[in-house]
Image (cartoon, rainbow, N blue to C red):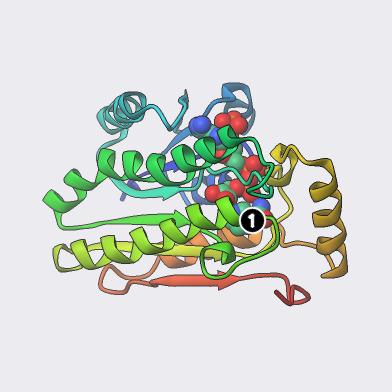
Amino acid sequence: MAKPLIVITGASSGIGAATARLLSDRGHPLLLLARRLDKLEELGLPDALCRKVDVTDRAAVQAAVREAEERFGPADALVNNAGAMLLGRIADQPEDEWDRMIDLNIKAVLYATRAVLPGMLGRGSGTVINVSSIAGRKTFPNHTAYVGTKFAVHAMSENLREEVAASGVRVVTIAPGAVETELLSHTSDEQIKTDYEAWKKSAGGALDPQVVAEAIAYAYQQPPNVTIREIVLAATGQEA
Ligand code: NDP
């Protein structure tokens, strides 16, 4: 039987790209969203609709999901993965970095969820997988605005899970520690980036994004009556 559609935001690099490859290997048609269309297309995955969408644009997310559902049938899962980690101190971090993280890490999670959830509720099945962070459970130096967004993802995921549980829709939170991706590169403070790299090294290195993709697939592949509510995973050497 043909496998159902899965929507992945931020599939152009890191965890999202690894998840796209893995779920494609498992036979799912995919909707892949990111701003760098070339990177999505470079993945070269079969039955993957690649769309250049800034996920902070509500209407664009809706339109892409509708297009994918017309082509592949209803979305059975959403991986809310797109995110930014702009580390800084509140006293001197450019304020627009807070706005960018709040728009992307919090509001865009709601936008993509709204694009798939009414259909899932109508069918009485579906899975929303939110990629939060260990920074959604505890604090770290220079992470004040970022932890605010990731605590929000944890809180929204749990509350949404309660909201839809009786309807047969599952909500999963994935909370990784440091993962080797492009995420840190967007932080503008060079000293903070250097210190973070040293911290990762002292922990024996960060996780491979493939490991996080496997955790996402594990949660998704459970029988419909089983919800893995949260997976917290980090490199063994990561103490914090
Ligand atoms: P990457 O920077 O490698 O990937 C981020 C993805 O988000 C890219 O595909 C990027 O695509 C996309 N993205 C960014 N802004 C937008 C936007 N406005 N619209 C659409 N897509 C966007 O980082 P990771 O793979 O590490 O990050 C994935 C998730 O994992 C994030 O939510 C992050 O917070 C979380 N996480 C990461 C950890 C880590 O240590 N790496 C640890 C814990 C959680 P493009 O630029 O092409 O738009």
Q: Secondary structure at mark 1?
A: loop
Residue 118 versus residue 231 in the image, above or below? above
* Quadrant in the picture for the C terminus: bottom right
**Mark 1 neighbour density, 10 Å: few (under 14) some (14–19) many (20 or more):** some
Residue occupying the point 39% across, 27% down: 57
Position in image of residue 118 (x %, y %): 17, 45
- Say whether residue 43 is left or right of residue 238: left
Does the rendering let one see residue 167?
A: yes
**Residue hosting label 1:** 143
Does the rendering let one see residue 44?
A: no
Residue 109 versus residue 222 in the image, above or below? above
Position in image of residue 31 (x %, y %): 42, 35
Tell me the quarter of the picture where residue 29 sits. top left
**Three-letter amino acid code at disc 1?**
His
- Say whether residue 224 is left or right of residue 103: left
Position in image of residue 132 (x %, y %): 50, 58
Residue occupying the point 82% across, 70% down: 203
